[in-house]
Image (cartoon, rainbow, N blue to C red):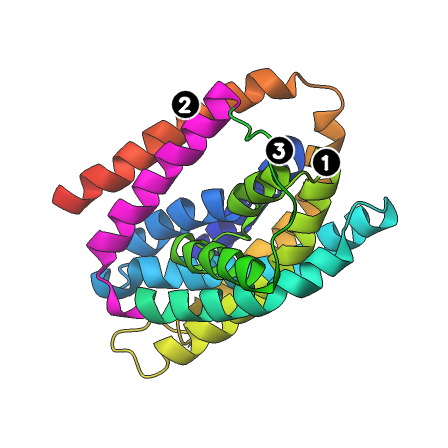
Amino acid sequence: MVYIVLYLAVGGVAGVLAGLLGIGGGLVIVPMLTSVFTHQNVAHEVIVHMALGTSLASILFTSISSMRSHHKHNAVVWPVVFRITPGILVGTFTGTWIASMLSTNFLKCFFGIFLYYVATQMLMGIKPKPTRDIPGTAGIFAAGSIIGVFSSLVGIGGGTLSVPFLTWCNTKIHKAIGTSAGIGFPIAVAGFIGYVINGLGAPNLPPLSLGFVNLGALAGIVAASVLTAPIGVKLAHSLPVDKLKRVFAVLLYVVGTRMLISVFW
């Protein structure tokens, strides 16, 4: 019962922050689940793998709501979503295979460094200048593959990478965010399938696990985040979001540092 409450808390916090700050839930879910799984005495060698797989599985549900919302505002450039999806699927599935062969400590280091990158981008308001158009078939496949690999290695829906890429390709920011929401769904599909397949038969998996996806944690996170995301959206219209992003950036530095320290102590 205690862990069910903790799963609900993870989903609740992730939902509010996603709605309030427009960040991917994986940035919150992965470190929080890693901590919960540690206290739950999940085997060290699969802790981060379980957190990544469960995070992407939760995005499978939450991305649908986000995608539909942006579509209603005509903010999803569907031709771009369809063109980049093959690369996304290949890259994300490949990333889950790579992750399954990496150690927990390596994944902790990788995620910690990624949090530093996101925090710096958020703190300094770094935005790429539009310098070119959407690339051709080969170029967009390569871009999708890279976004997919990195997204699966850090358990996110890809917005942290796809929004800057689309902005760089002369896509207006609101359409870049909406299109990124559309891209998040195939990332979640490939990530979910990949972490399930690559985790099947892995030793020391906790109860209620399907590969590297914990179904109990998934149910709690999805149930809570669906309810709290609208609260975050409402708060975004009444609170100083820019200031909150700077505070959250500092929190990401702390979480990233804690992740890195845990590798050695």
Looking at the image, residue 41 lies above or below residue 205: above
Would residue 113 appear left or right of 233 to someone viewing this image?
Answer: left
Q: Name the quadrant of the C terminus.
A: top left
Q: CA distance from mark 1 to mark 2?
A: 28 Å
Residue 253 seen in the figure? yes
The local secondary structure at tag 1 comes to: loop
Q: In the current view of this chain or complex, which residue is farthest to the left?
A: 264
* Residue depth check, mark 2 versus mark 3: number of the one nearer the observer: 3
Q: Which mark is residue 250?
A: 2
Q: CA distance from mark 3 to mark 1?
A: 9 Å
Q: Earlier in the sequence, mark 3 or mark 1?
A: 3
* Residue depth check, mark 3 versus mark 1: number of the one nearer the observer: 3
Circle 2 crowding by C-alpha within 10 Å: few under 14, some 14–19, many from 20: some
Looking at the image, residue 113 lies above or below residue 235: below
From the image, tell me which residue sits under label 1: 172
Q: Position of residue 203 (x, y in %)?
A: 25, 78
Q: Which span is picked out in magenta?
A: 100-125
Would residue 23 appear left or right of 102 to someone viewing this image?
Answer: right
From the image, tell me which residue sits under label 3: 130
The amino acid beneath tag 3 is Pro
Q: Residue at x 45, y 71 (%)?
A: 93
Q: Residue at x 44, y 76 (%)?
A: 196
